[in-house]
Image (cartoon, grey):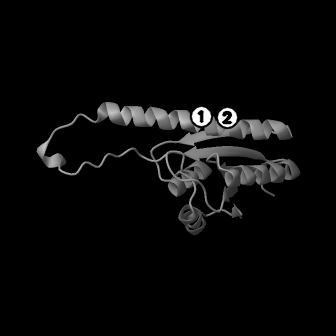
Amino acid sequence: MYSNIVCGVDGSDLANKALRHALALAAKTGGKVTAVTVTEPSIIVAPGAEIMMVDTSSIIEDLDKAKEETAKGILADAEKIANETGAHLTQMHVANSHAAEGILHAAKKASADLVVMGSHGRRGLGRLLLGSQAAEVLAHADIPVLVVK
């Protein structure tokens, strides 16, 4: 039935629960799972910037590097969960995207026939899934979406 599943992960307990559901479903259907984590664009807001010049390139580079490391850690944790079940897991990091857009992009790129995600996720640097992001994926996906609570 579902042979190619994309699962959004952000390191939260709920995202890990969603990943376990995706892995179990794939085991029953003989499918494969791609874990995707999304990191948002780095922006700097500086009031009064019109009167000063600041080179923000190194700041943005440092932020992007930190987000890349966070994404690697999240995907490594997802790999550990998959290894516990004996499943093979493909990994994908979508950088500089909003969560819902990144998950939908990953689903299209992976030719997925199902998206699995938590109903909400964590905030901050490692933020991936929020209630509004799950709702946005549901609204814009052209394939089935399984939302885990």
Measured from the top left, where is residue 6 in percent x and y? 67, 50
Q: Answer left or right for 115 relative to 23.
A: left
Q: Which residue of the protein is positioned furthest toward the right in this rendering?
A: 28
What residue type is disc 1 on? Answer: Lys
Determine crowd level at label 1: few under 14, some 14-19, many 20+ residues with C-alpha closer than 10 A: some
Distance between mark 1 and mark 2 Cα atoms: 6 Å
Q: Determine whether the residue tagged by mark 2 lies in a helix, strand or loop.
A: helix
Q: Nearer the viewer, residue 60 or 23?
A: 60
Residue under the image location 62 percent in, 35 percent down: 73
Measured from the top left, where is residue 16 in percent x and y? 71, 49
Which of the image's four quarters has the N terminus? bottom right
Measured from the top left, where is residue 138 in percent x and y? 60, 66
Which of the image's four quarters has the C terminus? bottom right
**Residue picked out by circle 1:** 72
Q: Which mark is residue 83?
A: none
Q: Is residue 12 visible?
A: yes
What residue type is disc 2 on? Answer: Ala
Q: Answer left or right for 80 relative to 29.
A: left
Residue under the image location 85 percent in, 48 percent down: 27
Q: Answer left or right for 130 relative to 75.
A: left
**Residue picked out by circle 2:** 76
In the rendered view, tell whether residue 64 sits above or below residue 28. Answer: above
Measured from the top left, where is residue 137 in percent x and y? 58, 62
Q: How many marks?
A: 2
Q: Determine whether the residue tagged by mark 1 lies in a helix, strand or loop.
A: helix
Residue under the image location 64 percent in, 48 percent down: 9
Q: State if disc 2 and disc 1 touch (CB < 8 Å).
A: yes
In the rendered view, tell whether residue 86 sits above or below residue 134. Answer: above
Q: Is residue 112 visible?
A: no
